[in-house]
Image: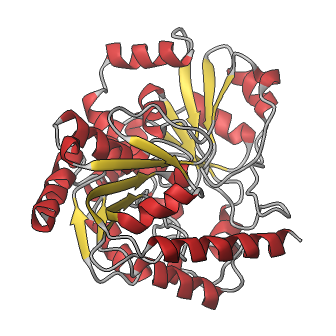
Amino acid sequence: MRTLLHGILKGIAICIYRIMCLFPVKQDKIVFGSCLGKSYSGNPRYIYEYMYEHGISQRWNIIWFYKKKPFIIPGSKQRAYGEMRYLYHMATAKVWIFDCRQPGFLVKRKGTYYIQTWHGTPLKKLALDLEDVFMAHAKNIVSYKKQFAKNSNCWDFLISQNSFSSEVFRRAFVFENKIWETGYPRNDILIRDNVPNEIERKKVELGIPLNKKTIFYAPTWRDDEFSKKADYKFRPEISFDTLRKELGGEYVLLIKHHYLIVDSQDWSVYEKFIYPFDESMDIAELYLIADMLVTDYSSVMFDYSVLKRPMLFFAYDETKYENDLRGFYLDYKNDLPGPISSTTKGLISDIRNYEPERYQLKYKEFIEKYNTFEDGSASERVCKYIEGLLRIII
């Protein structure tokens, strides 16, 4: 019944979108979205804010899309994903700016430009580089690759964090259009606001205690861990009870799910130790206030390394993830600039005994390869490209 209803609603949306495409494209309209409307964050946010702060946005009719409720965004209009006005704005916008794939039925019109900012340097294999697929809604690997290639073929421009990403994107996305190697606008804040008074201000704003060190736990999602409703789950093999017992006197733990995870957790029993944040939170602000990062196979490692702070890797299912689910572009055991553990006990030991000198050379090599353009000016570079594009449009 759920599948039938979904099919009916999709059919209606397709018909409405086709009708909306009868309206002329508005030459002054730009639409933005991040994480399918789940947050006001990522590269789109910082591109827009640069445009707003420098007066560029005043010349354009800018629409932001949201999923649940409007965000606090200065100087722009907002519309909800899925409503009729959303379909109208998608059909009539001159420029699309998104950080992930949009629904496949939204066919880009001739004369519309699609700027895909993407959302991370890839550690895990992507798209057409995958050998199999286990994701929700994916019928089989052949169908998945076909749909991905069809979607990426609509992108006119793609933003890249480094040359490594550009090479992977060309192949994995079958992308033949223009790649802008600018660095990620979302990381400008890690250069600009990485000062004690700004970090303290953000901690106070978020209710994080100033007298304890902060650990940010940011794992990725697992392709094969989802419910019957196709919602991805958060089930890491880690003991939060043990972490609190062993580290609670000195540390607090920040937790943020990947935006694909739809899984309610009751964190109230860990009050004053665990500080959870939902998908609406801008992850860059959590990077800034974290003294160290704990992750697994997430691209957060490439962004967080801009800060040159300790990174630790909790990879309890590394063998399965590499051999069965995804596979890696890096040598996981040898290329990462931090200790790798597979048990809660091992992670606690790594946190307590972390030695920066031990990973200094690997960290330096990691930064040189993946943070080539991260100098705090990525937003400016991207907006110069966009301004050049818009001048051509005008």
Q: Position of residue 343 (x, y in %)?
A: 73, 45
Residue at position x 35%, y 81% in the image: 175
Residue at position x 76%, y 46% in the image: 263
In the rendered image of this protein, does residue 363 appear above or below residue 297? above
Q: Nearer the viewer, residue 242 or 270?
A: 270
User: How many numbered badges does the structure rendering display?
Assistant: 0
Viewport quadrant of the N terminus: bottom right
Q: Position of residue 134 (x, y in %)?
A: 71, 75
In the rendered image of this protein, does residue 105 appear above or below residue 310? below
Residue at position x 72%, y 83% in the image: 139
Query: In the visual, does 141 lie left or right of 157?
Result: right
Q: Position of residue 161 (x, y in %)?
A: 30, 58
Residue 266 visible in the current orientation: yes
Instruction: Place residue 196 in its image quadrant.
Output: top left
Query: In the visual, does 276 lie left or right of 228?
Result: left
Residue 360 visible in the current orientation: no
